[in-house]
Amino acid sequence: MEIYLDNSATTAVYPEVAQTVYNTMLQNYANPSALHRMGKQAEDLLTQSRKIIASTVYGTPSEIYFTSGGTESDNIAIIGYAHANKRSGNRIITQTTEHAAVLEAFAKLEEEGFEVVRIGVDSEGFPLLDELEAAIDDNTILLSFMYVNNENGAIFPIDKISALCDHKKCMLHVDAVQAYGKIPINVTKSKIDLLSVSSHKIHGPNGIGALYVRKGVKINPIVFGGKQEQGLRSGTENIAAVAGFAKAAQMKLASLDSDSQKVSELKNTLIKTLCETLENVVVNSPENSIYSIANISFPGVKSEVLLHVLESNGIYVSTGSACNSKKNKFSYVLKEMKLKNDVIDSAIRFSLSAMNTKEEIDQVCKVLQKEVPLLRKIMR
Ligand SMILES: Cc1ncc(COP(=O)(O)O)c(C=O)c1O
């Protein structure tokens, strides 16, 4: 039995999505910029998909730009906005446990001369709002905060953060890659100016995502060419991936309530069983974290070793963010939360989807109940 619990890294596509991508590649392959009938057909599919994605976040179609995924959306939002608005101010603010796509974009802007402020987090991974409030000044033009942390699932108080921006000079960018399709997002209600989403976290194809840019927000392109996507993201559109993304978004949003209930139950079972049957289990996800992520430490067992032992039992998890795990052994997110070293060194991220079952979770618990005490003995 193969048990995939690495859904925050990427998800399996819905079969219906794979079918949509396949059909589109075979039947709707023309360039949407072409003037002929087939080009128009492709353009229509693009328009229809844009409408679908816009409706999922309560934006309008002209506010949605297709990109290659969360990383590119984050980069365009942060770098594109900072470049277009540098005359208004020089200070940009984020926090220390953002995804590398945000942190690296800020580092690039810092090199260019922007003043970057990185707000710290508390022991549960929530940004320190007092610190944030004190950091915002007349020179501040951008706040960038994630909706859900990809390592421990903390859901950030986006509405409160949004209330600290004037949305005239100081805008809010939200990296919603781990929230999209899992909790309802309303850019209008939450007053979000820029929002990044990605398809492959919601059972859509890889390499496609979107950036929402509120009407009137000035933003410079970072890629230049044929001026597709209203000039913000040049390059021939990947129509098949766009259609697959729209299909996945529709399916994910339609099952949001049932998925959240099912996955919450699975996560609760996993945490409860492990805490009740194993000694010294530390849960690094806060109480009301996103239902798809359970970050759990087994002090005394190195996370990398446990990951491979689980793998040999057909169970796939991660030690942190996939983008980071090959370069840095241990999670910078948990370090920023100032957890103890043995908790950081033994953390495993279990990330679930509605494709997982109760039987799978029972099997994972059974394997951990056997392997963790054995590994603790060996590693002592
Ligand atoms: C919070 C967050 N932001 C951005 C990204 C990058 O998205 P993508 O893989 O679509 O480039 C990820 C991917 O893991 C993520 O978890």
Image (spheres, rainbow, N blue to C red):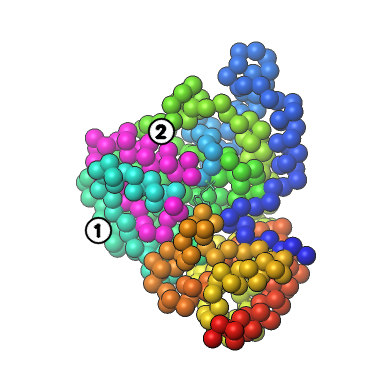
Seen from the viewer's position, the closer of residues 123 and 304 is 304
Q: Position of residue 143 (x, y in %)?
A: 35, 49
Q: Nearest the camera: 348 or 227? A: 348
Q: Which mark is residue 378?
A: none
Secondary structure at numbered mark 1: helix
On the question of residue 178 being in view, the answer is: yes
Image quadrant where one finds the N terminus: bottom right
* Mark drawn on residue 222: 2
Q: Secondary structure at mark 2?
A: loop
The quadrant of the image that shows the C terminus is bottom right
Residue at the location (38% across, 42% down)? 78
Determine if the magenta segment contains residue 78: yes
Q: Viewer-proximal residue, 313 or 181?
A: 313
Position of residue 217 measured from the top left corner of the image (x, y, whole percent): 38, 35
Q: CA distance from mark 2 to mark 1?
A: 31 Å
Task: Judge whether 261 appears above or below 37 on screen.
Answer: below
From the top left corner, tell me how far across and down residue 32 is, in percent: 61, 22
- Which residue is at a point 36% across and 57% down the rendered structure image? 95
Residue 134: mark: 1
Residue 210 on image: x %, y %: 53, 39
Residue stretch rendered in magenta on the structure: 71-100
> Farthest front residue?
378
